[in-house]
Image (cartoon, grey):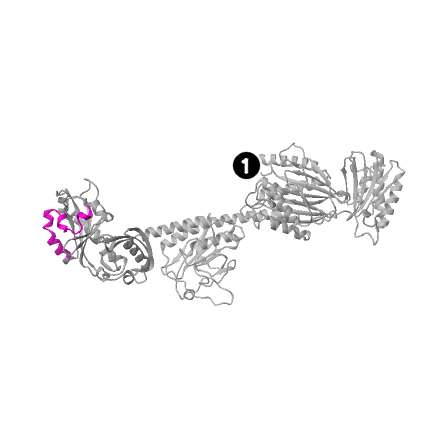
Amino acid sequence: MGTPEGHADAGVADAVTLVLDARGLVLSWPPAARRLLGLAADEVVGHPVEELLAPQDVKRLPEIRARCRSEGGWTGVLRLLRSDGSVPTLGVRVAALPAEAAGSGARWLVLAAESSRTARSAASGLTTTMLERIVGQTPIGLAVVDTELRCVWSNAALERFGGGPAQERIGRRLAEIQPGLNATVLEAQMRQVLETGVPVIDYEHVGRFRTAPRREQAHSMSFVRLEDERGVPVGVCYSVIDISERWRGRQRLSLLDRASEQIGRTLDVMHTAQDLADVVVPDLADYVTVELLESVIKGAEPQPGRIDDALTVTLRRAGARAARQGEPEPAFGLGAIATYMPGTPPIRALTDGRSWFTPRLDPLGLEWSAGVPGARSQRFGELGLHTAMVVPIRARGVTLGVTLFFRIRRAEPFDAEDLRLAEEVVARAAVCVDNARRYTRERDAALVLQRSLLPHVFPPQDAVDVATYYRPADELSGVGGDWFDVVPLSGARVALVVGEVVGHGIDAAATMGQLRTAVRTLADLDLPPEELMAHLDDLVVQVAREQRDALPAGVDGGVLGSSCLYVTYDPVSRSCAMASAGHLPPAVLSPGRDAVRFPDVPIGPSLGLGGLPFEAVELTLDEGSVLALYTDGLLASPGNPDAMTLQDTGRERLRAALEGGDLPLDGLCRSVVDELAPARPTDDVALLLARTRSLDTGRVASWDLASDPAVVGRAREMSTRQLDSWGLPGLAFTTELVVSELVTNAIRHASGPIRLRLILERALICEVSDASSTSPHLRHPRTLDEGGRGLFLISQFAQRWGTRYTGEGKIIWAEQFLDGQAPGPGAGREPGELPVRETV
């Protein structure tokens, strides 16, 4: 049976394997033979092979047998009979080989394949040559083993895979032919084929052969079962193809893929360097160290200029990996300073930016590093290092460090292919290292800016006890714009602020600084919370407009959408007012930590929308209540950080954290953050806890005054008497002057009821309130002017003074520092006693 005219010759993969006995009877007839010759097994098995051949080829059988015995085989083209007895126009390529099977006597192994050549072409010798190559000169190794897996035949090509000549293989098993080869795995494949009859195709095996014991080689092997005329297995025929180069190429690509996937997963320089060492061990090297310049690890630009290879250069070990723990024992640990001697390969690689490798290290040569002071330098032979490569880490034209590759147990030396692979991996890692360096520089700058803008020490005040905790986002998110502040206000009051700027990085930190400064400035004007938010919103709109004009089209400056919560607390009245611009309301923990509530604060629009009103809510707090102001990073659920989670699940988690422990304020603050936020959150977390105080009633005195100039002297007397009771006679003169001027101004320029109030806190506060909304202003009178010096005198004797507006009018206040004086023992009134309030 032939192939269509013009079809290409089939390769060895299309050959059919037959087994004949010594008399020429067909013993095996695999299914492929039927496809090739068109005859079923029951028509052939047990019949002499002569019945398959054309008459003229039958006459050639004695000659073919003789040549097989004398030459070890025969190849050629035979013409077969069709099932109807006619001769096909195309022949079949045949290779006949003598084979000995244990206990079964002589056998003939016949390989037959379709030929697209005619008998005349075969006579020319072309087809014969091709068949000879198949079994003799082909690079594909062929062998036949019996049921005991002992070799009975092999071709010459198999000798190139080690194991000696074909005649030395006869009767031996793989483990005897190739000592050191993992023969157990291969024989398991042969037994499987013998038991099942299912061929194993393209089985990949990697090992070391006697012909190249120091280098791993890869082979593709196929196994086919051979059967006799009864279908009983008589052996296995297997083929071997060398795919070492393809396998090494695949290994190189796999290593490069892993390098692309695993190196640079973080923006940490040290982690990135360690990723490089982890990727190449053990596939490329047994021991690898990554040494970086100190400036690179710190995020700075490498020092410009050429490194002098005559100098000792100090690097820092940023990554190291050994295939076996402690082999070799490193002279430097991770993060330690590594000093390399002048003229050594690492220094030369740093100097000229070129790689270096040697197939064989001098075992008597000293290691390149200077080692630990006082310790003996070890030799390469003592460390077990026998081959090495040094590859500079270069990115964007700058050398950042070097990577050192060594082999210990892996016998084969580094070659040029290994060096090219190492250079490719290091080149990819270098870009990641440089990106991490640049990120470190920007992150450090942003952190410095952020930390400089966040308050480290709050100004002294007696209204609340404060504890804060700030946890920055992880390295992938970068520095954010979360912030908080505590601002003392007039009248012993205090403002608590928390806010969040959209975005991350230096821009967010800079914007946060602008907003914090703006809030402190507006707070100094003593504006109500809702008015302060309106002014802050106008400022953000203006900043956003300026940024939009300065930045390229389509680039957002990151100010719009920022949020802020502003809370004021008065320790005298224990009233608390708060307003929100797109920020979550605070939590209020009642004294005793038995209940947490969330005030119903109207959440106004985020800052920057412009023109929309803000509302404030006012409530009275019990002394000892804890206010918790926070940013949304505290409530973000790791798996579901959406708005509903923040409002519902997040609040419940915060409630449980606040109620769940009897800790000091600082400890409670840290405990809440640890419980609700991960160690490396994806968003900045800021928490401010403030425990309210109530100012002792004995430290407040107030008097209602008539709108009569004669009351000014009486006001001075009452103030002096109160200072004596507080043990502050030294402030009597300046206080009389301040009271006289403030009360006189109220009587002369204001209307309605007038009230004088003295508050003793960290400073002595004097307040005069009236029903007028007209604000006084400081004047600079001329020498001959008879008036206009009142506020000027107050500004000279008081450390701070100002005006704040209320629903009934305004309050003019002035503060005097106590200059180290404090109320004497027993001064003032007992706690719980009503404050002084008289009408004059």
| Above-or-below relation of 364 to 702 | below
Residue 42: in magenta span: yes
Residue extending furthest toward the right: 710
Q: Which residue is label 1 attached to?
A: 555
Residue extending furthest toward the top: 611
| Above-or-below relation of 468 to 534 | below
Left or right, residue 376 beside residue 669:
left
| Above-or-below relation of 804 to 678 | above
Left or right, residue 35 beside residue 571:
left
Q: Is residue 453 visible?
A: no
Instruction: From the top left corner, tell me how far across and down residue 315 is, in percent.
Output: 50, 57
In which quadrant of the rendered view does residue 352 lie? bottom left
The kind of residue tagged 1 is Val
Q: Main secondary structure of the magenta part?
A: helix
Residues 404 and 469: in front is 469
Residues 548 and 804: in front is 804
Instruction: From the top left corner, tell me how far across and down residue 140 is, in percent.
Output: 25, 52
Left or right, residue 105 beside residue 406:
left
Q: Is residue 214 visible?
A: yes
Residue 724: in magenta span: no
Instruction: From the top left corner, tell me how far across and down residue 606 is, in percent.
Output: 62, 36
Q: Quadrant of the N terminus?
A: top left
Bounds of the magenta segment: 40-68
In which quadrant of the rendered view does residue 405 lie? bottom left
Tally the marks.
Answer: 1
Q: Residue at x 87, y 44 (%)?
A: 718
Q: Residue at x 29, y 56 (%)?
A: 191
Instruction: From the top left corner, tell me how far across and down residue 86 is, in percent.
Output: 12, 42
Q: Secondary structure at mark 1?
A: loop
Q: Quadrant of the C terminus?
A: top right
**Badge 1 density bin: few <14, some 14–19, many ≥20, Cα 10 Å:** few
Residues 475 and 517: in front is 475
